[in-house]
Amino acid sequence: MSCEMSVRASDADRDQIASALREHLAAGRLDTEEFEERLDRAYSAKTLGDLEGLMADLPAARSGPPSGSSPARAATLALPGGGLDRCAPTR
């Protein structure tokens, strides 16, 4: 797991994933039972890595992932602050 994925998830991070899961439910990619399981896991997630796993097998956000990125990485990039190296030392 990269340093970024070990960063603690915020309430905003969890809410954004929950919203994306609702869209996938509405699109028929998740059934109600799987949606509820993933939603429970989203709201109990401790790290960004925990959240990333919930989106790994779902298509990326509407805007699409950067070229060469996986759908899981795109979901992480969609998180607030995603794509930033939160572990890099500040200057």
Image (cartoon, rainbow, N blue to C red):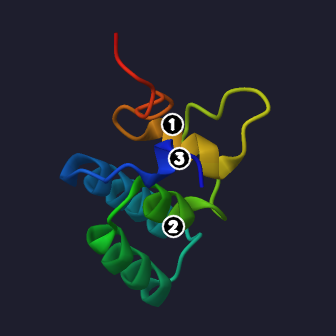
Instruction: Inspect the image, locate mark 3, and give the three-letter code of the amino acid beneath it.
Output: Ala
- Numbered disc 2: secondary structure: helix
> Dot 3, how many residues are within 10 Å of its Cα: few (below 14), some (14-19), or many (20+)?
many
Q: CA distance from mark 2 to mark 1?
A: 14 Å
Q: State which tag comes first along the sequence, 3 or 2.
A: 2
Pick whichever, 71 or 20, lies toward us: 71
Residue under label 3:
75
Q: From the viewer's perspective, tell me whether residue 34 is left or right of residue 17.
A: right
Q: CA distance from mark 1 to mark 3?
A: 5 Å
Pick whichever, 10 or 8, lies toward us: 8
Pick whichever, 61 or 82, lies toward us: 82
Q: State which tag comes first along the sequence, 2 or 1.
A: 2
Query: Circles 1 and 3: CB distance less than 8 Å?
Result: yes
Q: Residue at x 51, y 67 (%)?
A: 54
Please give the label number shown on residue 77: 1
Pick whichever, 36 or 81, lies toward us: 81
Task: Evaluate whether residue 28 shows in this view.
Answer: yes
* Residue located farthest toward the top when viewing the structure as drawn: 91
Residue under label 2:
54
Q: Position of residue 4 (x, y in %)?
A: 48, 42
Query: Circles 2 and 1: CB distance less than 8 Å?
Result: no
Q: From the viewer's perspective, tell me whether residue 64 is left or right of residue 35.
A: right
Instruction: Inspect the image, locate mark 2, and give the three-letter code of the amino acid beneath it.
Output: Leu
